[in-house]
Each structure stands twice: as structure tokens, then as C-alpha cells.
């Protein structure tokens, strides 16, 4: 059986090689009907938000701040939409990674897990 790629496309990779999962939590408690985070590049996130009643620019900034706490200093663009686009199977993909497999491998190779492996091999 070959590798399963679905879950790797449902996480955001940080520039320092960490894997940020469960990104939907940045929307908790905010007036958001639907949301999606797309990692366009290692240093760029596109956040699609279908705002609920009462959503303001302060909520938008809260989303950006929460994301930066999780992923560091990357560019974050917020796009307000009427509805988040559905996937081919009619569901919302809450996180989409547009990084290529080669980009993902390169980032993970220099990430915390790789540094820990290197540290243990020296000890």
C-alpha cells in the first residue's frame, strides 16, 4: 500500500518546519459561519471567511493574531466570502496545503523532528 496523502494536505507547515494542525480552532468563539485556510506558499496563508452577524475588522484581526501565534511571522490575507468553496465531494476543506510534495519534504527535513533525530544520533 502506498502513502496516504490526505492528512498531510490538511495541515499547515511553518517556515521553521513545524506542523500546525487543528487550525480551525483559530475561529472558535468568533462570528464566523464558514472558514478555510489555504497555504498558498510557505510564507503565505489565504483565509476565506464567510462572516456571521456582527463580524467586524476586529474579528478579522483576531484571526490573523491567532494564526500568527500558531505559525509565526507569515503573510496572512483574509478574504471575506459569501460561502467557502466546496470540494468535489461537496464538503468544506478547512485547511488546504498548496505546497508541492517536494516543498513539504524539504521543510519537514529541516523541522523540529529532524533536528531531534540529528541531536540523538550525535549523542
Image: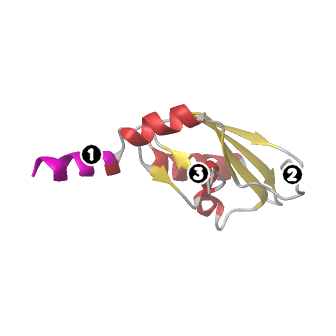
Residue 111 image point, x, y percent: 36, 43
What is the C-alpha distance between the residues marked 1 and 2?
A: 38 Å
80 to 29, vertically: above or below:
above
Q: Which residue is mark 3?
A: 8
Q: Which residue is mark 2?
A: 86
In the rendered structure, which disc, 2 or 3, sits on the residue that comes first in sequence? 3
Say the numbered circle drawn on residue 74.
Answer: none
In the rendered structure, which disc, 3 or 1, sits on the residue that comes first in sequence? 3
What is the C-alpha distance between the residues marked 2 and 3?
A: 19 Å
What secondary structure is found at the residue carrying circle 1?
A: helix
Q: Nearer the viewer, residue 117 or 77?
A: 117
Residue stretch in magenta: 114-123
User: Of all residues shown, which one is farthest toward the bottom?
Assistant: 29
Characterize the local packing of mark 2: few (<14), some (14-19) or many (20 or more) Cα atoms within 10 angstroms: few
| Residue at 65% in and 68% down | 29
What secondary structure is found at the residue carrying circle 3?
A: helix
Asked if residue 122 is among those painted magenta in the image, a careful observer would answer yes
In the rendered structure, which disc, 1 or 2, sits on the residue that comes first in sequence? 2
Q: Nearer the viewer, residue 91 or 52?
A: 91
Label 2 vs label 3, nearer the camera:
3
Amino acid at each position: 500500500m502506498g502513502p496516504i496523502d490526505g492528512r498531510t494536505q490538511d495541515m499547515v507547515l511553518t517556515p521553521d518546519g513545524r506542523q500546525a494542525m487543528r487550525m480551525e480552532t483559530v475561529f472558535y468563539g468568533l462570528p464566523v459561519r464558514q472558514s478555510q485556510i489555504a497555504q498558498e506558499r510557505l510564507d503565505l496563508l489565504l483565509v476565506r471567511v464567510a462572516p456571521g452577524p456582527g463580524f467586524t475588522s476586529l474579528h478579522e484581526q483576531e484571526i490573523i493574531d491567532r494564526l500568527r501565534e500558531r505559525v509565526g511571522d507569515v503573510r496572512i490575507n483574509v478574504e471575506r466570502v459569501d460561502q467557502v468553496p466546496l470540494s468535489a465531494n461537496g464538503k468544506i476543506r478547512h485547511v488546504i496545503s498548496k505546497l508541492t510534495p517536494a516543498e513539504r519534504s524539504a521543510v519537514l527535513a529541516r523541522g523540529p523532528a529532524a533536528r531531534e533525530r540529528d541531536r540523538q544520533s550525535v549523542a
